[in-house]
Image (tube, helix red, strand yellow):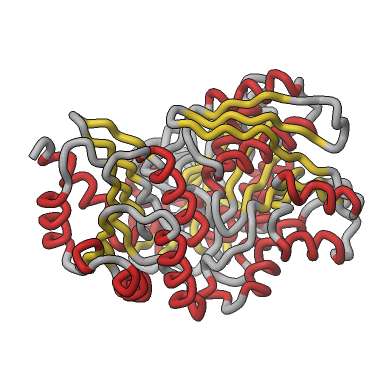
Amino acid sequence: MSRFIPVQLKNWTNGQLFQTGVNASDVERHYVGVSKDTRTIKPNEVYVALIGPNFDGHDFVDAALSSGATMLVLKADHKMAKKMIKRLEKEPVNFDLLLVDDTLKAFQDIAHGYRQSLAASVIGVTGSFGKTTTRRMIHSILAPQMQAMETFANLNNEIGLSETLLNAQPEDQVLVTELAMDRRGEIQTLSAIAKPDVAIITGIGHSHAQFLGSLRAILEEKTSIIDSMKDNALCIVNGDNKMLEAWAITKERDLSVWFVASEQNTGRLERDGFPVFWAEEIKLEKNGTHFVARSSFDSSHRWPMYIPEPGKHLISAALFGLATAYALGLNMERAAAAAAQFENTGDRQRIIERDGLTLINDTYNASPESMYAAFDVLNLLSEGRRSLAVIGGMRELGKYSEAEHVELAKYILANPPEKVFVTGEEALPTYRYLSEHMAQDQVVYENDLERLISKVRSTVKRDDIVLFKASRYHQVEKVANALLESWPV
């Protein structure tokens, strides 16, 4: 169980500590956890009162105390801080008070301080796409040989990462964390909190171009994960990405870089002097993905791997996991075999069979790369069946949006479904391009959710396979759920 002591928190946050005389003289006084949420806080935990655009954690201080919190971390100039100081002076209370300038920074400072006290290796996963899948895969591969913890759900931002670290236990051997961003400088901040021992960069794409402006800026943001790493740390990156390859060759820091790459790019990367992990003998089947993993560290070794889900895009995630296992000195045969335990989470390529209908719910979010991967899976699974797609716009692409939506249309046309439903204003370029190259009744644009549901319900037939894919904003998962609720029609 975790133990946090008063002076430790004071030093990590540079805050002002207030205690009753009894509490201050208790040399065994400690707290068993740190929480920002009074709905889940446990007795003898620290409550940090965060302030957001639509809430103020100071409003819930009484609830935290009622649930057994024994330390409050409050903003020093907040009226609640003054109120709690008076309570400490007048009442026999069992809580301590830590006053700070900024409670969010204090939350992060506590997480950073705690991370420094842990013996566990920290794996930090970032990139423009595939972060969650890669993080889940790495955890699946490491867990049979190490006590491993990973980011829960989508706790991958400046609050969520801190929460993940604070939930780690002293006996954990490896923490697989996910680092996401929606503004410039956030990855650098997250790296400073987590201080990864191994950094994973899944790729550089157009996601978040709306906020960062250019691919060059996205590259700089994602690669800033190395800023808080030790010089003897390791960065494993996507070798099929030209920008990451160029970055690795020209980077100034003395930091080891390994690559995960397609077989055709392996020779070039090896000639540049980089270790590479790659896949051969790839077999994509309805029930899973088979391949043989290899490494330039010892080309005689061959590790057969099986992932119990279809999709070529899963191979790089598995190779990242295998490379991480190699870096940690694990048994590679066991690591390769562990990929068979991989499971996706949430609405990520969730394949549902229902009375003659196959539904692919991949509505967790959408980037160009994940869109291509989703259509690859649809094409793999259809095999003679009538296939349909319900797709929505890809958001946060900025100046690249129109061009990327046209490129998506071209990708779809290489192996088009029998019918495509399109929603979202961002996706109008996709709809227009498809309309120019497909029959009129093959492409439908509908921006009203209820009408879209009605049109999809009236179109889908038994034995169809239907893909649902869009940025979360467009709520295409509601169309998928409505179809399942009304099936069979």
Q: Quadrant of the C terminus?
A: top left
| Residue 15 position (above or below residue 164) | below
- Provide residue 166's location: percent of width, then percent of height: 57, 41
Q: Quadrant of the N terminus?
A: top right
Query: Is residue 463 among the parts visible in the rendering?
Result: yes
| Residue 430 position (above or below residue 373) | below
Which of the 4 quarters of the picture holds residue 3?
Answer: top right
Which of the 4 quarters of the picture holds residue 251?
Answer: bottom right
- Provide residue 164's location: percent of width, then percent of height: 55, 42
Residue at 29% in and 69% down:
424
Q: Residue furthest left?
A: 489
Viewed as shown, does residue 331 lie left or right of 273? left
- Provide residue 448's location: percent of width, then percent of height: 16, 67
Viewed as shown, does residue 264 lie left or right of 466? right
Q: Nearer the viewer, residue 433 or 165?
A: 433
Query: Is residue 86 among the parts visible in the rendering?
Result: no
Q: Nearer the viewer, residue 359 or 165?
A: 359
| Residue 102 position (above or below residue 375) | below
Residue at 79% in and 52% down:
229
Residue at 37% in and 62% down:
56
- Provide residue 98's location: percent of width, then percent of height: 56, 53
Q: How many marks?
A: 0
Q: Nearer the viewer, residue 183 or 366?
A: 366
Residue at 14% in and 51% down:
459
